[in-house]
Image (cartoon, rainbow, N blue to C red):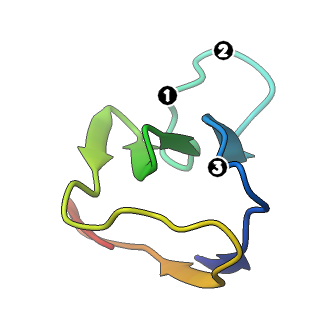
Amino acid sequence: FSFDFAVRPPLPDGLILLYGRNSTPVNDFFWTAIEISQSRLRFQLRDTVLVATNTVLNASTWYHVEYQFVGSTILV
């Protein structure tokens, strides 16, 4: 899965992408939430939470995000 995004200043905290079934359980195989939290990307992929601590987002900059599931490994 991949997508591009840009954010206008000021850089808000909030949800960028939510993907999954609209029924329980919400943590099924394809459930994904990606958000901005404290100027960093935060991924919740199934039951795994990843925070891109080495990348601080800047307003008015285009970003390209890709992630892939390979078995039990998540490539971001």
Judging depth in this view, the residue of 54 and 72 nearest the camera is: 54
Query: Label 3: how many residues lie within 10 Å, few (<14), some (14-19) or many (20+)?
Result: some
Judging depth in this view, the residue of 16 and 45 nearest the camera is: 16
The image shows a total of numbered marks equal to: 3
For marks 3 and 1, the one nearer the N-term is 3
| Type of the residue with mark 2 | Thr
Dot 2: element? loop
Dot 1: element? loop
Q: In this view, does 13 lie above or below 32?
A: above
C-alpha separation, residue under disc 2 versus residue under disc 3: 32 Å
* Residue drawn at x 27%, y 39% as measured from the top left: 48
Residue 34: where, in percent of width, then height? 55, 48
**Residue under pointer 2:** 24
**Residue under pointer 1:** 27
Which disc, if any, is residue 16? none
Marks 3 and 1: which is nearer the front? 3
* Residue drawn at x 45%, y 49% as measured from the top left: 39
* Residue drawn at x 79%, y 62% as measured from the top left: 8
Residue 27: where, in percent of width, then height? 49, 28
Q: In this view, does 59 lie above or below 44?
A: below
Residue 55: where, in percent of width, then height? 30, 67
Judging depth in this view, the residue of 6 and 18 nearest the camera is: 6
**Residue under pointer 3:** 11
